[in-house]
Image (cartoon, rainbow, N blue to C red):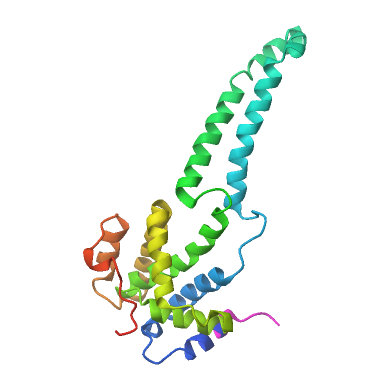
Amino acid sequence: MAFDLAKFVREAFQNTGPSNPLRKLSERERMFISACLLSYKGIPGTGGSDAWEQAARTATEAATLAKKISEVLSAKHMQPVWDLPPLKSYFGEFEELPGRLRVFSVVLGGYLRHLVGKPGHQDKVMHNHFLIMASEFVRCRTGKHYDEHLAELFQALNNDSDLKDFSGDAIRRKREHFEKAYPLLYASVAAKALKLAAREERETGHSDSPEATRFSLTRAKGHRSPKTRHSESGSKH
């Protein structure tokens, strides 16, 4: 029997409190944030199977390969081979290859470290970005993060006793750490959430907060409001 995500999400929302503001979201919006939370709950790939981990390994391998190629090209015992007429002009074109591979390694490796963390951490970072996406999308559509209510939904979706202590404060801390440690990725996630929220507003013709889109646009451009440094959890609103 096929898994009915729509039914699963509806039942999860029925298990949240009647005052949970996320109940006001459209069904499609509920599906989106629920999918983000379920993806966050999933266990990250092991052994660096994540695409970001693979890209980081490729950057490292490129530097190693550059060194090996350079050693082969400069090896004295290989010189007679390079001097052979059929090979001399052909392999001469590869003299710049080690340098190009080193540049590739430095640029890609540096970009990935700045964007999604050090090697071995990319999988976890990209795993966490699903939670940040859900949190930012809620803020874009409502004007507040409503962390406590998002945590309530998270628990309703998972029905896992190990997650009973997962709170709105935990979400806030993860979001603030994510923004501080990975500013480029955070900006990218916030911009994507804004784009999705703006599209939803156009298609549904309403927003739960008239100021939400304008506020989100300012945040996505990198301007922070002093009132949002410690966002309300939403539990008392």
Q: Is residue 51 above or below residue 79?
A: below
**Is residue 5 magenta-colored?**
yes
Give the residue at x 63% y 17%.
93
**Quadrant location of the C terminus in the rendered image:** bottom left
Q: Position of residue 133 (x, y in %)?
A: 44, 66
**Region rendered in magenta:** 1-7
Residue 92, by quadrant, is top right
Q: In the displayed structure, does residue 219 sit left or right of residue 22?
A: left
Residue 192 visible, this orientation: no
Q: Is residue 171 above or below residue 95?
A: below
Residue 67 visible, this orientation: yes
Q: Position of residue 227 (x, y in %)?
A: 23, 68
Q: Is residue 83 above or below residue 196?
A: above
Residue 63, by quadrant, is top right
Q: In the displayed structure, does residue 17 sit left or right of residue 53?
A: left
Give the residue at x 43% y 75%.
29
Give the residue at x 75% y 7%.
85
Q: Camera-side residue: 129 or 94?
A: 129
Q: Position of residue 229 (x, y in %)?
A: 28, 65
Q: Position of residue 141 (x, y in %)?
A: 34, 73
Q: In the displayed structure, does residue 1 sit left or right of residue 164?
A: right
**Is residue 166 magenta-colored?**
no
**Quadrant location of the N terminus in the rendered image:** bottom right
